[in-house]
């Protein structure tokens, strides 16, 4: 049975390549769109599975769209295909992900068949998603959040203000995050840059990190 | 000076009961006198005596009803459908009972036992059971229609009393002064705000107890004698239909109803100087109608049209006045909730509604204080910051500047367009002289508000209001989601709103359960 599949990604290149890669005997790509409104406007009841990027730019993200699609078609399969190794890096929590959805990290796809398998599997109701329950990046929630703000350029004082904690606790969180990510802690300014770089490589943004070591 | 219209006369309180009573008297006598005497045992005095007794009994019932159980005279709406149904059921029951007893006892229609049964059932059904049942049904239907409003009204009353008496303000001040002793820095302010935030479960919506409602309505019932009269008369249908057959009986009812409606149409246009004159006229018209409709129905439906003519006419006329009165009530009744609500309002001090409303108000005050303390945390922190952070943190600086923002309308529309696929919007937008820079700030607020409504509130409906004048852009977003969850504290999302609005924003529960975000952005 051929699955009718929708691909949503705001990056043109990403979505056309993903669509081309998964099209085959078992999967028929019926629509390829770039934004949530376009996706909702389709005949969702006749779509079997949706492959969504987490980050869709301004407005609703992939998770919001997944919930919206499920409202229109409660049995639609959801595959979140994203470069964020952990949803917390995208400021989303595991609890927000829709039930019975697959979370596939782009960097880990060495074989396109892994994605096809995830798509085919997503249509069957899978109650247990053990992957999603364990954090994929071994940092605590507050460390991830602190790191995220640091990577966006905030100073410790600014981070402390946003999170309404003391500056001391921000410094602690950064130190612990650095240890967990194996970044050496001798020089302060390098440490921040290194942390930011590490953060972005975990989000899949920088694939050329090795060039700068 | 015009007198009252006939309708107004007939619609008056005593007139109706009186009218019915007066019309019934001769008919009652004549029915029994001629029908029974001729058809049964020829004993005229006996039948006349029974007629007078029965009539007197009915009068007693009416008087009792008017002076005891139903003292108050204010009008309330009687659900006619219920009243009719009840009457039909009572009439049917009575007819069946009498008919089956006649069969099983093997007696003729004029037998004394049967007469007694008829009288007794008529009295019990018509005088006691039916009026009370009708009253209760009418009360319940009015109450159900208005309960939500009533409870809310009562709660509001309690809350405004709390506010007027200074109770809420006193609570607020206590909470603040207690908190002040514990707040020394931003972290403790945050901790204190979490403590102050009310953690109890939302109290269940209070209902006003049933016994209170019924008691109030019984004491406030209008037209009591009227109800008694009507329903007793409807139950007389139990006699009519067995006497002339179903088709004929129903036809008579329908013709009479039409005739009465026509009478009333005319009655609204005719004016009389005094009640007596209008009463006379009314009686005349009614009698005439009675004469006419009975025979017509008989001609159509009966195969022996004129034989039982007199009996038909007389049986017909028992309920004809009843239907007249129906029309009167139906057209003249006012909404009764006022009476019930007033009474219940008076009991506000002793009812649980008031306690629970007070509880709600306290929780709302606590939430306000907790939010204010949390806001304080940000401000304390800013003032203590060593790097002299005196300007508001602006996330704009962190994003790449966009080269072409578009017109203000385009900017706002783009924010709405992306979320409009997932939620329905009601919009009220007047951008005034808002420029693109201001529009970008408004857009941030909207995006934050809509994301909040969708993700945390799980809403599917938002109403968005944006009004821009020379100083401020005022934004309000109300959603129909599940509201602020228990124990929820303002979190990181508020940082963005802080950066755009300073402390000119608030997140509150909305009246119907969702949330309302109100924000003001200073126009640059």
Image (cartoon, rainbow, N blue to C red):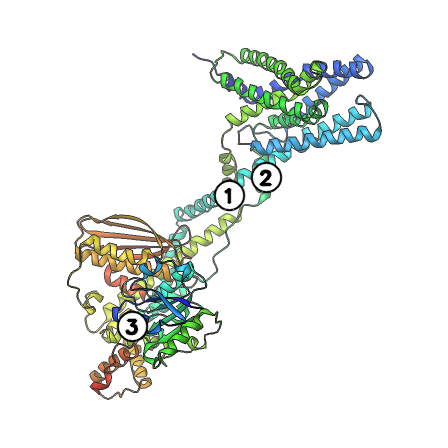
Which of pointers 1 and 3 indicates the residue nearer the eye?
A: 3
Depth check: give the residue in front, B478 or B427: B427
Label 2, secondary structure: give it.
helix
Give the quarter of the figure containing the C terminus of chain B: bottom left
- Relative to B422, is B311 on the left or the right? right
Label 1, secondary structure: give it.
helix
| Marks 1 & 3 on one chain | no
Residue placed under numbered mark 3 in the picture: A17
Query: Which chain letter matches label 3?
Result: A
Which of pointers 2 and 1 indicates the residue nearer the eye?
A: 1
| Marks 2 & 1 on one chain | yes
Query: Which chain letter matches label 1?
Result: B
- Relative to B173, is B347 on the left or the right? right
The residue furthest front is A25
The reply to whether discs 1 and 3 touch (Cβ–Cβ < 8 Å) is no
Are there few (<14), some (14-19), or many (20+) residues within 10 Å of tag 2?
A: some
Q: Which of marks 2 and 1 is nearer the N terminus?
A: 1
- Relative to B79, is B161 on the left or the right? left
Residue B353: % across, % down: 50, 48
Residue placed under numbered mark 1 in the picture: B147
- Relative to B208, is B386 on the left or the right? left
Determine which of the numbered discs, if any, sits on residue B341 in the image: none
At x 23%, y 82%, the residue is: A208
Label 3, secondary structure: give it.
helix
Residue placed under numbered mark 2 in the picture: B214
Q: How far apart are marks 2 and 1 (CA)?
A: 13 Å
Which of pointers 2 and 3 indicates the residue nearer the eye?
A: 3
Give the quarter of the figure containing the N terminus of chain B: top left
- In the rendered image, which quarter is residue A33 located in? bottom left
């Amino acid at each position: 049975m051929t699955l009718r599949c929708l691909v949503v990604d705001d990056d043109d290149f990403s979505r056309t390549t993903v669509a081309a890669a998964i099209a085959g005997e078992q999967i028929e790509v019926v629509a390829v769109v770039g934004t949530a409104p376009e996706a909702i406007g389709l005949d969702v009841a006749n779509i079997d599975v949706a492959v969504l990027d987490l980050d869709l730019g301004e407005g609703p993200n992939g998770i919001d769209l997944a919930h919206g699609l499920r409202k229109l078609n409660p049995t639609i399969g959801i595959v979140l295909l994203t470069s964020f190794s952990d949803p917390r890096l995208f400021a989303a929590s595991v609890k927000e992900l829709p039930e019975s959805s697959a979370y596939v990290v782009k960097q880990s796809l060495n074989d396109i068949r892994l994605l096809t398998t995830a798509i085919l599997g997503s249509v069957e109701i899978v109650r247990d998603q053990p992957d999603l329950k364990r954090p994929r990046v071994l940092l605590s929630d507050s460390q991830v959040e602190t790191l995220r703000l640091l990577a966006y350029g905030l100073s410790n004082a600014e981070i402390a203000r946003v999170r309404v904690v003391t500056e001391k606790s921000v410094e602690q969180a950064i130190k612990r995050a650095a240890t967990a990510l194996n970044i050496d802690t001798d020089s302060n300014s390098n440490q921040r840059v290194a942390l930011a770089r590490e953060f972005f490589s975990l989000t899949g943004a920088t694939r050329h990190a090795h060039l700068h070591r | 000076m015009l007198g009252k219209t006939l309708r107004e006369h007939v619609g008056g309180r005593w007139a109706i009961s009186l009218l019915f009573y007066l019309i019934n008297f001769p008919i009652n006598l004549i029915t029994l006198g001629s029908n029974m005497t001729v058809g049964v045992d020829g004993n005229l005095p006996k039948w006349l005596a029974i007629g007078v007794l029965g009539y007197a009994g009915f009068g007693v019932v009416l008087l009792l009803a008017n002076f005891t159980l139903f003292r108050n005279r204010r009008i309330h709406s009687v659900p006619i459908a219920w009243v009719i149904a009840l009457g039909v059921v009572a009439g049917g029951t009575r007819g069946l009972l009498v008919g089956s007893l006649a069969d099983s006892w093997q007696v003729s229609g004029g037998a004394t036992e049967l007469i007694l049964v008829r009288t007794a059932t008529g009295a019990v059904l018509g005088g006691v059971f039916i009026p009370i049942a009708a009253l209760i049904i009418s009360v319940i239907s009015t109450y159900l229609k208005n309960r939500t409003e009533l409870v809310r009204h009562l709660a509001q009353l309690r809350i405004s009393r709390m506010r007027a008496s200074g109770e809420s303000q006193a609570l607020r001040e206590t909470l603040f002064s207690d908190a002040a002793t514990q707040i020394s820095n931003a972290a403790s302010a945050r901790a204190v705000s979490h403590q102050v935030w009310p953690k109890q479960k939302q109290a269940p919506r209070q209902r006003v107890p049933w016994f209170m409602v019924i008691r109030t309505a019984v004491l406030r019932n209008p037209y009591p004698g009227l109800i008694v009269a009507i329903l007793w008369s409807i139950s007389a249908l139990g006699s009519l239909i067995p006497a002339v057959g179903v088709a004929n009986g129903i036809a008579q009812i329908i013709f009479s109803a039409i005739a009465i409606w026509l009478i009333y149409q005319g009655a609204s246009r005719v004016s009389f100087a005094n009640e007596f004159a209008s009463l006379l006229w009314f009686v005349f018209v009614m009698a005439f109608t009675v004469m006419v409709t009975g025979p017509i129905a008989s001609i159509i439906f009966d195969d022996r049209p004129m034989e039982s003519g007199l009996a038909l006419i007389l049986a017909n006329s028992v309920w004809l006045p009843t239907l007249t009165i129906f029309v009167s009530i139906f057209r003249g009744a006012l909404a009764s909730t006022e009476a019930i609500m007033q009474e219940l309002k008076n009991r506000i001090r002793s009812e649980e509604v008031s306690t629970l409303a007070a509880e709600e108000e306290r929780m709302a005050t606590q939430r306000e204080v907790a939010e204010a303390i949390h806001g304080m945390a940000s401000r304390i922190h800013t003032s203590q910051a060593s790097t002299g952070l005196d300007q508001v943190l602006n996330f704009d600086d962190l994003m790449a500047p966009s080269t072409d923002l578009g017109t203000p309308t385009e900017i706002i529309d783009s924010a709405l367009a992306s979320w409009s696929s997932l939620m329905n919007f009601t919009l009220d937008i007047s951008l005034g002289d808002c420029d693109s820079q201001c529009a970008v700030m408004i857009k941030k607020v909207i995006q934050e508000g809509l994301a909040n409504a969708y993700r945390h509130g799980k809403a599917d409906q938002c109403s968005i209001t944006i009004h821009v004048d020379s100083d401020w852009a005022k934004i309000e977003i109300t959603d129909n989601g599940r509201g602020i969850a228990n124990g929820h504290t303002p979190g990181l999302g508020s940082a963005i709103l802080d950066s755009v609005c300073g402390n000119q924003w608030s997140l509150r529960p909305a009246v119907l359960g969702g949330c309302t975000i109100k924000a003001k952005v200073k126009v640059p």
